[in-house]
């Protein structure tokens, strides 16, 4: 088997005493820290979804907001991921911050955000992305790149005298966590892992996991 050399990753001790009792506050600390480090797109996260028949798929989406209510991303409501979420709201998110030796894994349930929240975000997007949202029948087979570009041009023309409205097939999902794991790289594979698990309304239990 081919062996790949592994770079030295940052290794910073992480102890229970350093953690905030609230996983959202802890996420905020780590997210802010990641944004201050020089690596691209710390808000890019893997989203795993499973259909009712157990078929499981993964893809990258962008975290657009988070607070005490959950973690928000936006997508096409007709896409494969959305169909799977509608069948089975159990999802997982993973932030792969390998270059800084950190990983966060969230397990929870996804539900649509309000249309008002989707509209607010949609309005903040560049016009080209708004037209792109109308153009893409996300996850469906298409004939060619040309047909996609033609649909884009038609959509551009259709709305040339107006703002681009929010498509009713496009919007956000909020992932409400049941657990959040913070993983910190350490030497000799003795990584530090802490799992926050919901143990009642707004109550979280924190346990150290074996690496
Ligand atoms: C860096 C990056 C960011 C992405 N962000 C999003 C996003 O926020 N929303 C989205 O629907 N797709 C996003 N995509 C595309 C998805 O990975 C995926 O191709 C698409 O959503 C269709 O997935 P599905 O067929 O499983 O539904 C992104 C891809 C990359 C590489």
Image (tube, grey):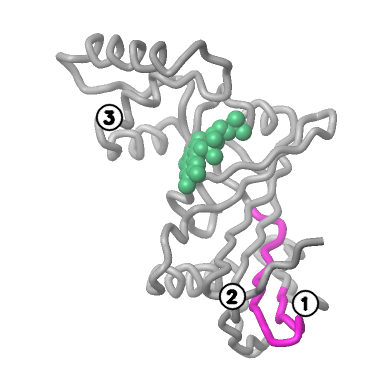
Among numbered discs 3 and 1, the one appearing first in the sequence:
3
Name the spot of residue 100 as percent of width and height, x first. Answer: 53, 74
Rounded to the nearest whole Å, what is the CA distance between mark 3 and mark 2? 35 Å
Q: Nearer the viewer, mark 1 or mark 2?
A: 2
Q: Say whether residue 163 is left or right of residue 54.
A: left
* Mark 1 touches mark 2? (CB < 8 Å): no
State the residue at coordinates (60%, 76%).
7
Q: Which residue is mark 2?
A: 101
Q: Quadrant of the N terminus?
A: bottom right
The response on whether ligand 1 sits within 8 Å of label 3 is no
Residue 207, numbered circle: 1
**Quarter that holds the C terminus:** bottom right
Circles 3, 2 touching at the beta carbon (< 8 Å): no
Is 184 one of the magenta-colored residues?
yes
Q: Identify the magenta region.
A: 177-194
Residue 128's disc is 3
Helix, strand, or loop for circle 3? Answer: helix
Residue 113 visible in the current orientation:
no
Name the dominant secondary structure of the magenta segment. strand
At label 1, counting other C-alpha atoms closer than 10 Å, the crowd grade (few under 14, some 14-19, many 20 or more) is few
Q: Secondary structure at mark 2?
A: loop
Crowding around mark 2 (Cα neighbors within 10 Å: few <14, some 14 to 19, many 20+) is: some
Q: Is residue 149 above or below residue 69?
A: above
Q: Quadrant of residue 134?
A: top left
Where is 1 relative to 140, above or below?
Answer: below
């Amino acid at each position: 088997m081919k062996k790949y050399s592994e770079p030295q990753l940052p290794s910073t001790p992480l102890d229970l005493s350093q953690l905030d009792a609230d996983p959202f506050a802890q996420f905020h600390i780590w997210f802010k820290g990641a944004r201050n480090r020089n690596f691209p797109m710390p808000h890019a996260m893997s989203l795993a979804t499973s259909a009712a028949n157990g078929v499981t798929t993964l893809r990258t989406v962008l975290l657009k907001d988070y607070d005490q209510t959950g973690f928000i991303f936006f997508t096409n409501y007709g896409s494969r991921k959305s169909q799977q979420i509608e069948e089975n709201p159990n999802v997982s998110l993973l932030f792969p911050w390998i270059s800084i030796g950190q990983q966060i894994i969230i397990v929870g349930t996804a539900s649509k955000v309000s249309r008002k929240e989707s509209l607010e975000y949609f309005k903040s997007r560049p016009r080209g992305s708004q037209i792109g949202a109308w153009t893409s029948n996300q996850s469906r087979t298409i004939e060619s790149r040309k047909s996609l570009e033609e649909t884009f041009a038609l959509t551009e023309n259709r709305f040339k005298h107006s703002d681009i409205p929010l498509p009713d097939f496009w919007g956000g999902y909020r992932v409400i966590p049941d657990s959040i794991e913070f993983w910190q790289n350490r030497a000799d594979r003795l990584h530090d892992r802490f799992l926050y698990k919901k143990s009642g309304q707004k109550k979280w239990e924190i346990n150290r996991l074996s690496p």
